[in-house]
Image (cartoon, grey):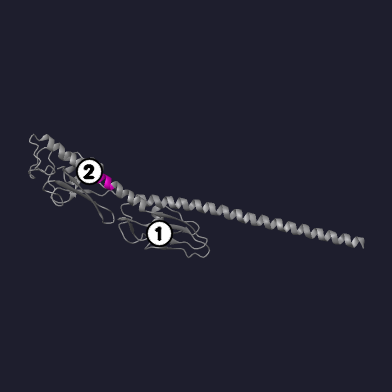
Amino acid sequence: MHRTESGHAVLAMVAVVVTIAGAIVAGWTTLATRTQADALAQVQQAYLEEVRIALQGWYARELARVDRSVDAPDAGVLLREAGIGPRWGLRLAASDRLSRDGTAYRVIVAWLPGEADASVLDASSGRFTPSAGARWTSVSGFDLQAGAVSETRARLDRLARHLESAFRARLLSDPSRDATVNRFRALRCAAPSAGELPCIDDFTPVDAAGLAQAAGIDPLLLINAWGGPIEASNGSGASQAMPFSMALRTATPWGGTLAISAVAAP
């Protein structure tokens, strides 16, 4: 009887040991699985950051053309032009051209699908709805385009101030100091005198109108932040009566117009 009880005790102990060992193995397996999942998540998140940087760089390089069209750019074109190698089933989608404060832009979203991907980008609003398990990142072109608008306005303002200074210099160099003469425009258009600004009857790129050379304009002020021309006119759109003015304008990639006038002080 004693031996039987002893045998049962041994068997019970073995069962306990086996149970504990199984629990340990299961714990190790769970821990290993969780560690692998966490490592994969970190790798995928790092990859998505690389994708975001590539898309941001592409948007900055293509700032002059990306928002000309209302329609969204093709995902395949984005991948190719941004130099992105797709991994883990990467998907891309771009919104239609959006507008805020008069600035056009679009939103581009990149995501790694979950098990049953139903993620969707609303092209008309730029709002992204990810499905469960999806990892994603996005790029908005608003700050880039708003920065270009701001820089272009600054260039227009500098150009206007430069032309106003040229007007005053011509006025002060005239012994008569005749304030009734429009020094934004040559008195005789066919034969401007030295230092006079040429006659520009209709809006013409500054570098093609002879204005840049006549007024000694910084080449940076001849183009906008997208590389397009800045135009000037001292005929159409300008004042031929006191206070005289010269009109300046330039086009945005989405067809808007930024404008300012150089105005002679009364």
Q: Residues within 10 Å of mark 2 (few under 14, many from 20)?
A: many
Q: Residue 187, percent across and down? A: 8, 43
- Horizontal side of residue 171 vs 101, given as left or right: left
Q: CA distance from mark 1 to mark 2?
A: 41 Å
Q: In the rendered picture of this protein, how many numbered marks are placed on residues? A: 2
Residue 29: name its quadrant.
Answer: bottom right
Earlier along the polypeptide chain: callout 1 or callout 2? 1
Q: Residue 71, percent across and down? A: 33, 62
Q: Which residues are magenta?
A: 152-160
Q: Amino acid at mark 2?
A: Leu
Q: Quadrant of the N terminus?
A: bottom right
Residue 159 is marked as 2
Q: Which residue is mark 1?
A: 76
Q: Is residue 62 visible?
A: no
Q: Residue 132, percent across and down? A: 51, 62
Q: Residue at x 74, y 57 (%)?
A: 20
Residue found at the far front of this picture: 266
In this rendering, the answer to whether 23 lies above or below 153 is below
- Horizontal side of residue 153 vs 82, given as left or right: left
Q: Amino acid at mark 1?
A: Gly
Return the residue nearer the eye: 77 or 212.
212
